Image (cartoon, rainbow, N blue to C red):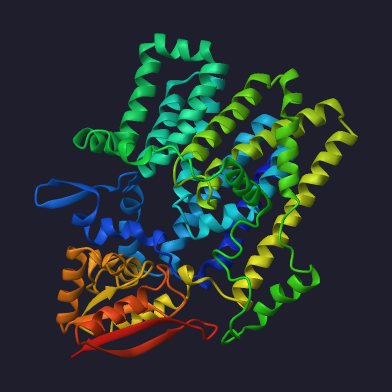
Amino acid sequence: MRQALPWLAAAGLTLLFCLTGAVFIPYAGAQYDEVLFTDAIYAPESVEYFTTIGSSKVPVMLMTYIGTLKAALYLPVFKLLGNNHVSLRVPVLLAGAAAVFVFFVVARRLGGAKIALAVTALLATDAVYLLTCVFDWGPVALQHFLLAAALYSGFRYAETKRARWLFGCNLATGLALWDKAIFLWLLAGFGVALLFCFRAELWAIARSRRLLAAAAGGFLLGAAPFIYYNYRRPLQTFLANTQVDESVPISFKLLSIDKAMDGSGLFGYIVRESPEGYPENLKFAEKVPLWLSGMLRAPRSSWQHLLLVAALMLAPLTWFGQRRRLSVFLLLGLVFSALLMMSTRNAGASQHHTILLWPIPQLILVLVLAEAAARWPRKGAAAALGVTLFCALSNAAILNQYLAQFISSGPTVIWTNAIRPLVNELGRYHGRLVFAADWGISEQVQFYGAGRIGFHRPADGTVLSLHEPLSRAYVEKSLADPKTLFVTHTEGREAFGGVRQKLIDFAAERGYRDEILHVIKDRHGVPIFEIHEFKR
C-alpha cells in the first residue's frame, strides 16, 4: 500500500488539474484559432492540402505548418457528443492532464517520488499551462501530450535499450511534427543536444539495423502526412515559415517566457483587466473566488518564476552528480529550442509559443532539487520541497485570480461568451449566408453551427483590402445578394480596427442603407456583435 501512495497522489494531482480546468470551461466562448481545425471536418476542400481517396476528400494539412491530427481525433467526438464547450474542451483538457501524469512518471525516475510529486503539483497548478490546455490556444494540448510521451519513451529506451521504446519515442515525435510543425524548434534543439551529450548512444542506434529501423519507422509513420505534403508541395512548410525575425527584440521574447513562468501572461488577453458591466445570473459559488481574490489582494504573478529561474541558474550544480549528462542535455535542449523559437519571425513573443517549452524547465527543477536533497539530505530536502509546494500554492492563487476576473470582468472580445448567442441568432435565418467582416467570427459560426450555417469563407480580411479590385468586386457582389447577412463587432471592439465603419461607408457609397437587425451582448451586458442587413 505504501508503494502505491505516490501513484495515488499523482493521480490526485492529475484529477485536480482536470477539475480545475473544468471550472473554466464555460466562461469563455470558442476562439477563432481554437476551432480552426473544424475546417478539415466541415469543409475539407478549403484546407491547405487534401488528397482524394475514391470520392472522399481527405484533409492532410490545415495550414502550411498545422496538420489535421486534431481534426481526425475530434471527428468521432463531435458525432457522439455534438458541438459544444464540453466536446470541444474536455478532450484537450484530458490530453493536458495525461501529460501531467506522464511528467510525474518521468520525474519520479529522475528525482524520487517526493520531489516528483512536489514539482508535478507545480505543473498541475501552472496558470498559463492549464489555461492554454483548457482553451487549446495555439493549439498546444496535443503538443504537450506528445512531448511527454516522447520523453517517457526516450527515458525508457535509455534504461532498457528495447526497440519498442525507441519506436514509441519517434512515433510521438513524428505525430507532434504533423500536428504542428513548430515542434521543429524542440526537435532540432534537442537533436543538437543529443549530439552533444549522447553521441555514443546515437552511434549504437545507427549501427544496429533493428534499432535504426525502429527509430526511422516510428518517425516516418507519425510524420508521414507532413512528409507527403512537403513532397507534393516541395518543402512548402519550410519556405513559408522559416524567416528570421529582425524586428522584435530578443529581450521582449524573453519577457514572454518570464510571464509564462509567473502566470501573468494571459491577463488582458483571455480575461478583461477591468469590468465593463455586472455579470448576469451571478451564482453563490461564483462569489467565493471573488472573495478570495479580495483576501489575497488580487495577485498578478506567482513565485514560481523565481523558483524556475533559480533552477536554471543552479543547473550546473547537477553536472557533478550521477545525472550530469542528462542535466546538460535538458539545459542545452531548452536553450537551443528557445533560441530557435525566438529567432523565428512572428513567433516567441506570445504565450502559446512560449508554453511549448514546458515541462522542460520543470524537469530541470527536478534534477536541481534531487541534487540538493543528495547534498543536504535533511534540511536541503525539506527546504526544497517546502519552497516548491509554496510556489504551487502561489500558482493556485493566480488561477483563482483568472477565475475571479472571468466572473467579474468577463473574457476579452476574441474569447467572448457572446459568440454562441450570436450563432444561435444567425441560425434562425434559414437560407441566409453570413459575411463576417472581421476576424474572429466565421470559424466559430462553423463550429457552433456544426457546418450547417452558410457563410462567405473568404470574407475575413476582405473589407480591409478594398483597395484591391478583387476585394471590391467580392464585397459588391455580397452586398447585391439579398441572402447575405453581415456580421461585425461593435464600434471600437474590432480585431481589424475600423473595419465596421469601412464596410458601412463602402456600402453607403453604392447606395445601400445599413439596418442593424440585432446587437448581441455578452454575459456582462456589453454589446459585442452586430448583425447588419444592407438594402437599397
Q: Looking at the rendering, in which quadrant would you find the N terminus? A: top right
**What is the quadrant of residue 130 in the picture?**
bottom right
Q: Does residue 359 sit above or below 275 in this rendering?
A: above
Residue at point 65% right, 78% down?
286
Residue 197 locus on image (x, y percent): 57, 17
Q: Position of residue 231 (x, y in %)?
A: 22, 32
Above or below — where is 337 with respect to 278?
above
Query: Residue at the location (31% across, 60% down)?
Result: 38
Residue 66 percent across, percent down from the top left:
35, 46
Q: Nearer the viewer, residue 249 or 300?
A: 249
The quarter of the picture where residue 120 lies is top right
* Residue 75 visible somewhere in the drawing: yes
Where the C terminus falls, by quadrant? bottom left
The foreground one among 405 and 80 is 405
Which residue: 41% across, 75% down? 419
Say above or below: 260 vs 80. above
Tell whether 326 sits left or right of 370: left
Identity of the residue furthest to the right in this view: 379
User: In this rendering, does residue 1 appear at all?
Assistant: no
Residue 26 located left or right of residue 466:
right
Q: In front: 416, or 325? A: 416
Residue 246, compared with residue 349, is above or below; it is above
Residue at 67% in and 30% down: 110
For this orientation, the residue located farthest to the top is 207
Residue 363 position within the rendered picture, expressed as x and y whole percent measured from the top left: 64, 36
